[in-house]
Amino acid sequence: MAEKDRHVLKAILRSATPYLSVNASVLDVGCASGTLLEELRERGHKALAGVDVSEYAVRASKENGFENVYLCNFQDGTQLPDSSYDTLFMLDVIEHFTRPYDALIEATRVLSPGGVLVLTTPNANSILRPLLGKRWALGDETHVFYFTPFSLKYLLGKCGLHVAKLQTRSYNYGPVARVLTALRTAGQIVAIAQKPYSASRVGPSDSRRPPAAEGGVVEAR
């Protein structure tokens, strides 16, 4: 997770609050230095863990008091037990994966039945993206994929997750931001998806696996 302003993080957590019990075990995928974990700890959460691909991030999170933080590339799989977390956060992470399907399959595996994934990513359908071009605030040369609300919902479904809530939001406030949000053309997608209590196992070798792609924008519809 990229470091976020606290007001942005609080806005995301407001969307997630109805799905997030204070007693839930939480895994932050792409935890960076632990900004989200700190916010959750301040709200009374205790069962907190994280993973990150950066040794520096893992070390920083541990220095901030989070012992259960692990170094790994989540899309390659982890040694975490099946159904071991009630809530997973992937905040501005999935666009960096070269294999986002594999990352979501791993998320589904480690989620407990009925568990919830909270995911954010830049919106490829943002009205500001073509207008601002390289000056678009949510653009980044390290992004491999961009998703639209439709393509993200489709991919989550392919990975065995039920989308309970999906909206776009703006980093700014006011009437323009509200209109963009209503039209699903604001800059960031916020998705909340739930693992069914009972479902057939879906894995990387499953015949429903989407075709491989090299990156870019996942098809918009």
Image: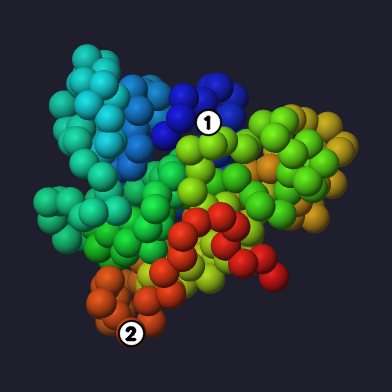
Residue depicted at 33% across the width and 42% down the height: 29
Quarter occupied by residue 186:
top right
Mark 2 closeness class: few <14, some 14–19, many ≥20 residues within 10 Å? few
Query: Residue 134 at x, y = what percent?
Result: 70, 35
Residue depicted at 26% across the width and 21% down the height: 56
Q: Secondary structure at mark 1?
A: helix
Answer whether residue 41 is visible to the viewer in this image: no
From the viewer's perspective, is residue 94 above or below residue 205? above
Query: Residue 191 at x, y = what percent?
Result: 54, 54
Query: Residue 96 at x, y = what percent?
Result: 44, 44
Q: Are marks 1 and 2 in contact (CB under 8 Å)?
A: no
* Most foreground residue, 75 or 163: 75
> In the figure, is residue 48 to the left or right of 163?
left
Label for residue 9?
A: 1
Residue where numbered disc 2 is placed: 207
Answer whether residue 14 is visible to the viewer in this image: yes
Residue depicted at 21% across the width and 20% down the height: 59
Residue depicted at 40% across the width and 24% down the height: 35
Q: Amino acid at mark 2?
A: Ser
